[in-house]
Image (cartoon, helix red, strand yellow):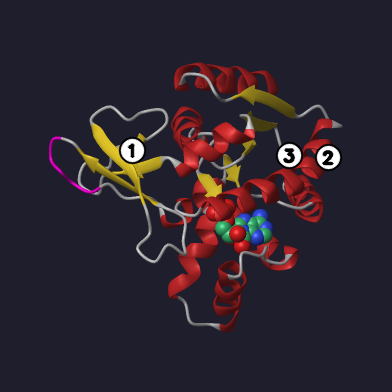
Amino acid sequence: MSLNIILMGVQGAGKGEQARFIQEKYGIPQVSTGDLFRAMKTRTDALAQRIQAIMAAGNLIDDDTTNAVVEERLAQPDAKNGVLLDGYPRTPAQAAWLDAHLASKGSKINSVLLLEIDLYTAFKRSFGRVSSDTSKRSYNIYYNAEGIDWSFEDHADGQHPPRLKATHRESGEALRRRPDDASAHAIIKRIDTFVETTQPLIDYYRSRGLVTRIYADQPIEVVTMAIQYAIDAHK
Ligand code: AMP
């Protein structure tokens, strides 16, 4: 019997960490449509180029294309026991297609996990995040700033918002922000889009009793335990 899980959460809710746990514990691969699309970057065919253009504009890829990419991924041998879906489905049409597709394989969605945090916390988790290229460690100026120095520096031309600068105190290494975390405006837009697009999906799955809401502004281990409990209850 396969195990298919959907992991939902606004950026900054800690999905990455929890996805690693779920993959290891349940032996199912994480399937992220964003990653699948990004991996097509090096391809030069018309489909791949069209996808890059749509992503660059910050828009969603159309449902048929997205479903086709997911179908191909689900047919891979490592997905035979199920998958952890991340960033998919994003629309009711994708959710309906996924249901039909899984049903045709004698399978179904077992559990939908919604990692919830208040949106200002979500903003700060993304906006305050910096990391070291050498140690790969992440820090956050609001939550986890031990051992780092940080400040906001006015932009030279005065036309742009101040820039966040952070360095590792001991080594002096300049810490980096993810490019998509560097603009407050872009973070807010992503949070807005998430709230708008996710709500109809939550309604869709809730009516079938599949949704577990997990408060994610708690220690990682507590969130992990809640996830494990929810998955095991729906297996
Ligand atoms: P993500 O990494 O999940 O934020 O996805 C990055 C980009 O890939 C999105 O902004 C969309 O352009 C595209 N994308 C990812 N997943 C989907 C999806 N389920 N439906 C449509 N577009 C998607």
Q: Which mark is residue 204?
A: 2
User: Gap in Å between the C-alphas at discs 2 and 3?
Assistant: 14 Å
Q: Which residue is mark 3?
A: 108
Ligand 1 contact, mark 2 (Cβ < 8 Å) = no
- Work out whether mark 3 precedes mark 1 in sequence or the reverse, and give the earlier one: 3
Note whether residue 235 is visible.
no
Q: CB atoms at circles 2 and 3 under 8 Å apart?
A: no
Q: Which residue is mark 1?
A: 138
Q: Amino acid at mark 2?
A: Tyr
Q: Amino acid at mark 3?
A: Lys
Q: Secondary structure at mark 1?
A: strand
Please tell me whether mark 2 or mark 1 is closer to you in this view. Answer: 1
User: Gap in Å between the C-alphas at discs 3 and 1?
Assistant: 36 Å
* Residue at the image position 63 percent from the left and 46 percent from the top: 191
- Work out whether mark 2 precedes mark 1 in sequence or the reverse, and give the earlier one: 1
Q: Which image quadrant for residue 62?
A: bottom right
